[in-house]
Structures are given as C-alpha cells and as structure tokens.
Image (spheres, helix red, strand yellow):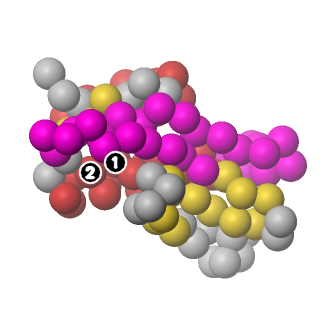
Amino acid sequence: MSSNETKIQHDKRARQFFIVVGEQKAYLSYMDLGKKTLDYYRTFVPQGLRGRGFAAKLTEYALKYAEQTGYSVIPSCSYVERFMQRYNRDDAKTA
C-alpha cells in the first residue's frame, strides 16, 4: 500500500473524512450536532478496496480528530461503534 493510498483527507464542508485510491473513494461521514458533539453515522468502503484496513484507518483518524478538537462522539455507524468497543475507545463517546 503506497503512502498516497493511505492519505486521509477531511472535507469539513461535506462533513467527511475520506481516502481516494484510483477512482474509488472510501469515507466516514458525520454530522456536527453542536455542543462539541459529532455523530459518526456512516462508513463506506467500495468493494474493490475492502479488506485493506481503510475503514479502520478512517475511524481511527476521525476519533483522533474528535479527541484533538475537544469533541465527543456518538457512534451511530455500527462499524464505528464496534471499532470503539474492540479498541477500548469508549472514552470518546458521549454519556
């Protein structure tokens, strides 16, 4: 996997963290709910990119972003919720 493949970008206007590989785009979408709370509601990886760790990379990046900017996270996306449980990242969750 080249470094270009793993470069995660953040489009604040579209409220999306994403990786582009060739013509395919993997992404994690969120809503800013105000009161320093982000709802991570959708993770998508195209069929041709699956099994290469892109969803995990996007989720880790998004959780670090929330942590560094003082946001709490609501993991509406089942992948994000399982990731947070598996890697003991419940500290980012809202109460």
Q: Regarding mark 1 in the picture, which secondary structure is present there?
A: helix
Residue 92 lies left or right of residue 19; in this view the side is left
Residue position marked by numbered label 2 in the rendering: 66
Above or below — where is 55 with respect to 95?
Answer: below
Q: Is residue 26 visible?
A: yes
**How far separated are the C-alphas under marks 1 and 2?**
5 Å
Please tell me whether residue 65 is drawn above or below residue 92 in the rendered image. Answer: below
| Label placed on residue 86 | none
Mark 2 Cα-neighbour bin, 10 Å: few <14, some 14–19, many ≥20: some
**Residue identified by numbered label 1:** 63
Check disc 2 and give the amino acid type.
Answer: Ala
Residue 56 seen from this side: no
Q: Contact, CB < 8 Å: mark 1 with mark 2?
A: yes
Residue 10 on the magenta span? no
Residue 52, image x, y percentages: 71, 51
Image point 84% across, 42% down: which residue? 47
Q: Position of residue 31 (x, y in %)?
A: 38, 40
Instruction: Tell me which residue sits at (82%, 69%) in the image.
Output: 22
Instruction: Sort mark 1 into few (<14), some (14-19) or many (20+) by Cα contacts within 10 Å.
Output: many
Start-end of magenta stretch: 27-53
Residue type of the residue flagged with mark 1? Leu
Which picture quadrant has residue 19? bottom right
Quadrant in which the C terminus appears: top left
- Residue 32 located within the stretch drawn in magenta: yes
x%, y% of residue 32? 31, 43
Name the residue rendered at 86%, 49% in the picture: 48
Residue at the image position 61 percent from the left and 68 percent from the top: 6
Where residue 51 sits, quadrant-wise, is top right
Tell me residue 77's x, y (percent).
49, 27
Picture layout, residue 14 above or below residue 6: above
Please tell me how many numbered marks the rendered image carries.
Answer: 2
